[in-house]
Image (cartoon, rainbow, N blue to C red):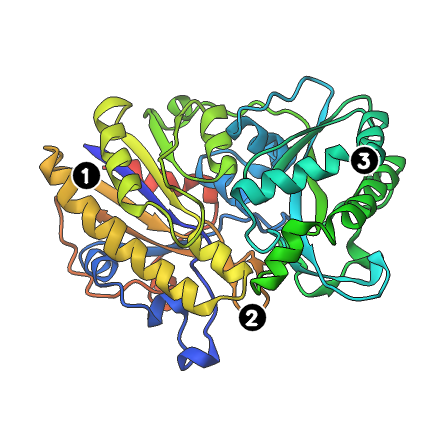
Amino acid sequence: MKYILVIGDGMADDPIEALGGKTPLEYANIPVADSLARKGVLGTALTIPPGEVAGSDTAFLSIFGCDPRVYNKGRAPLEAAGAGVSVPPGNVAYRCNMVALEDGPMGFAEKKILSHSGGDVDGQEALDLMAALFADARFQEGVERANLLIHVFPSFRQIAIQSGVDLAGFWAAPPHQHLDEVIAPILPKGSDVAVTLLGLMELAHEILDQHPVNEARRARGVLPANGIWFWAEGTAVQLPQFAEVFGHTGGAISAVPLCHGIAALAGLRPISVPGATGKLHTNYEGKVAASIQSLLENGDFVCLHVEAPDECTHNGDLEGKLQAIEWIDSRVLANLLPGLEAAGIHEYRILYMSDHRTLMSTRGHDEAPVPFLLYDSRKDTGLGLDFSEANAAMGQYVADGTKVLDLLFAE
């Protein structure tokens, strides 16, 4: 028996007026998921415990059997692990997003944050802009005085490690939860560490705002990556081992360091796929092939994670979110089932779910329970219901998200 977890990141949503009162899952053309749901089991799971911040770090920890109220010491250390960055004991890790701040003559604090991803900046543009920061003596000196080391990647996601600081009182906001808001109320605050990081953020905006790369992006009608944003602070953490919690081994396929980091810390093998971007246009077919190969080589469990629905929602792209959900159906699920059979894997169980809800109405995460479908290749339950939030709400409710994988592994 093989066990497959497919996560459509942030695909669950509320009804949307522009879709005739349907959710994206209800509106999208997803014949494979609907077919699996009709033969399987539907339900909902609370992956965000009460009082915890809705986000993939909280949700992924829950899904992988790690109570986030115990093990979430900050998102950045988890992402650092996925990016191969060590967080020494006593040091602090931060996510350092490249962000887009609105243009205009207003002061830094009065600008709105328009994109948590610098308008999806990546590749050489991201590298060139980060290089411009360190080419400025003021920024380089500020980083050194702060005992800060920024690890640079060809993405909007950067990782910073700081030594010799105390996080007491420090507060930083997740940028993707405050899109189109004036940043003054959500800037880092509460400690000397916050003052230092805020100073670097202001200086970075000054350096990057009129950089040739950003001028070229504006000329193309693309948002500039004209700022950085420190957040997701935390210290290193040890997670319960997946094999000890669930009695199974395997791998995790994702383009997102957070998913890979949690997987690695939990003892699963993180697997990268060429052409996997974490965006709408990604290597869906490659992820399927890698998942099947992992089932043959790494154990009896694999997690296949697709970030695209979440990123499209944060970008306010409803058409993209619908396309992402449909491509998970037509390019992941539709290829996964025959691929498993071709590999000689005839008995398998699939759990297909959203990690958390991401709402088009706010472009942010939501803590409400998420829908899931559970399919067993050996059975036909005759349920007869399509995959949607409303139908899932009529099924089994898992009040503790750390138990949702128990359903996948149950016989």
State the CA–CA distance, disc 1 to disc 2.
Answer: 37 Å
Residue 328 at what x, y percent from top left? 31, 54
Mark 2 nearby-residue class (10 Å; few <14, some 14–19, many ≥20): few
State the CA–CA distance, disc 1 to disc 3.
Answer: 53 Å
First in sequence, mark 1 or 2: give its number: 1
Residue under the image location 84 percent in, 57 percent down? 109
Residue 127 vs residue 72, the one in the foreground: 127
Residue bearing the label numbered 3? 139
Residue 257 at what x, y percent from top left? 51, 35
Q: Is residue 128 visible?
A: yes
Residue 365: quarter of image: bottom right
Q: Is label 1 or label 2 in front?
A: 2
> Of helix, strand and loop, which one carries label 2?
loop
Circle 3: residue type: Phe
Residue bearing the label numbered 2? 361
> Of helix, strand and loop, which one carries label 3?
helix
